[in-house]
Amino acid sequence: MSARYQLTGTTAVEISASIESGIRTDALPPGTALPPVRALAAELSVSPATVARAYQELRQRGLVATAGRHGTRVRPRPPVAARRGALRPPPAPGLRDLSAGEPDPRLLPPLGPHLAALAADAGAPITYSGAGVLPELAEAARARLAADGVPAGELTITGGALDGIERLLGAHLSPGDAVAVEDPGWANLLDLVAALGLRPIGVPVDDEGPIVAGVAAALAAGARALIVTSRAQNPTGAALTAARAAALRDLLAGRPDLLLVEDDHAAELARVPLHPLAGATAHWAFLRSVSKPFGPDLRLAVLTGDETTVARVAGRARAGAGWVSTVLQRLVLALWRDPSVTELIAHAADSYDRRRQALLAALATRGLVGRGRSGINVWLPVPDETSAVTALRDAGWSVAPGALYRIAGPPGLRITVSPLADADIEPLADALTRALHPAPPPHLTA
Ligand SMILES: Cc1ncc(COP(=O)(O)O)c(C=O)c1O
């Protein structure tokens, strides 16, 4: 912990406020170890129970995490807006940034022509009573989902996948409840689970999706919800196969207490078929965001599911933000209907596939086994993340350390292929090889 930052307070509320303020001002940056409960209690002349309550409150809000003998630390991305502006500092000049998990901006459909068409045909202003899910968008979404074998359920629209997942978890679970999540899994989801005061139970993932025994173990440990990425799993690129989906459906059948959430975020970009679990449980939701194929700034996802689950999400939204702007809904509908956009996205899917497979092949010829069945990332197991990330940075590449995505799984790196040109693949594979097998120091002679 920063030697200069003095924790203060004599009540749990004051102590947690002092820690929160340290996080907000970056005096306690992510990863900072907080003092052991007894040590801080002695320093502040309060009882250990008071400090424990303060830590517990911060844990429930996802600001800190406690990991056994590693003590309590500030989480990597705590949910308080830091004064330091953007959460991700820009990479150092000259560094090629493969750490961001962003879609390739060159491959996103241009919005200009469709915005212009919307402006020309804006119609009368829409007021509270006329707003909600646009029936034409719902109809088009149902047809797109049905084409992929997702059962026709109730449907609503959310402000992206994570917004939908937040509403689902909020409507079905209470703080302290356990949620089964993929390990490694999407960092933003782990942040959300922590911010909601839920307990993540990691389920190991292989190339075919969550491992059945891992899901069974999470259910046995009391998980009340299970979140599965259908394809382009972040960070490993796993995609549910028919066999894995069938086995999981068997396992999940007859679990009326379990909320099943499927996240098909890369749908139009995935070059592998969808094998949905939708409908395997009484309470289920299937989400499809437009972020990766059409652009993250559209902030829109389709959420379908059983009647109760969708009604809870839509009802909770109505009590808060209300609805996703019909302007955005009309824009997404226009993009869906434009054959030239469909063509662009098919081209994007091919481009990601080609670059991902080229990197995996280049690694394989160097004896390195990466993972990435689908999507925009390659996951590379490494013995030590810190030394690999540092060696790569020295070689001019920024990659994401697996720690952001892991609960208990082994270390690795996430490498996003979006910024890569074909000519980058071999030099990158060389740099990764050197980072993982550093040359021994030169032999020193007397
Ligand atoms: C696994 C996963 N799901 C969903 C999304 C998209 O989320 P949103 O719709 O909230 O932008 C992403 C984006 O990175 C992702 O990695």
Image (cartoon, helix red, strand yellow):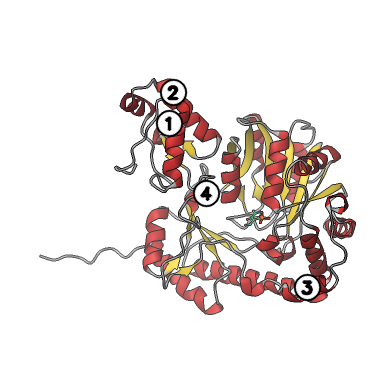
**Is 111 or 161 nearer to us in this picture?**
111
Q: Give the mark nearer the N terminus: 4 vs 3.
A: 4
Vertical order, 173 against 135 (above or below): above
| Residue 379 x/y as whole percent | 54, 58
Helix, strand or loop at label 3? It is helix
Residue type (three-letter) at the residue carrying disc 3 = His
Disc 3 crowd, CA 10 A, few/some/many (<14, 14-19, 20+): some
Does the numbered disc 3 mark a residue whose Cβ is under 8 Å from ligand 1? no
| Disc 4 C-beta below 8 A from ligand 1 | no
Q: Which mark is residue 15?
A: 1
Dot 4 or dot 1: first in sequence order is 1
Q: From this viewpoint, is residue 332 visible? A: yes
Label 1 neighbour load within 10 Å: few <14, some 14-19, many 20+: many
Where does ligand 1 appear, by image quarter?
bottom right
Residue on which disc 4 sits:
81
Q: Amino acid at mark 2?
A: Thr
Q: Position of residue 306 (x, y in %)?
A: 84, 41
Relative to residue 156, is residue 292 drawn left or right?
A: left
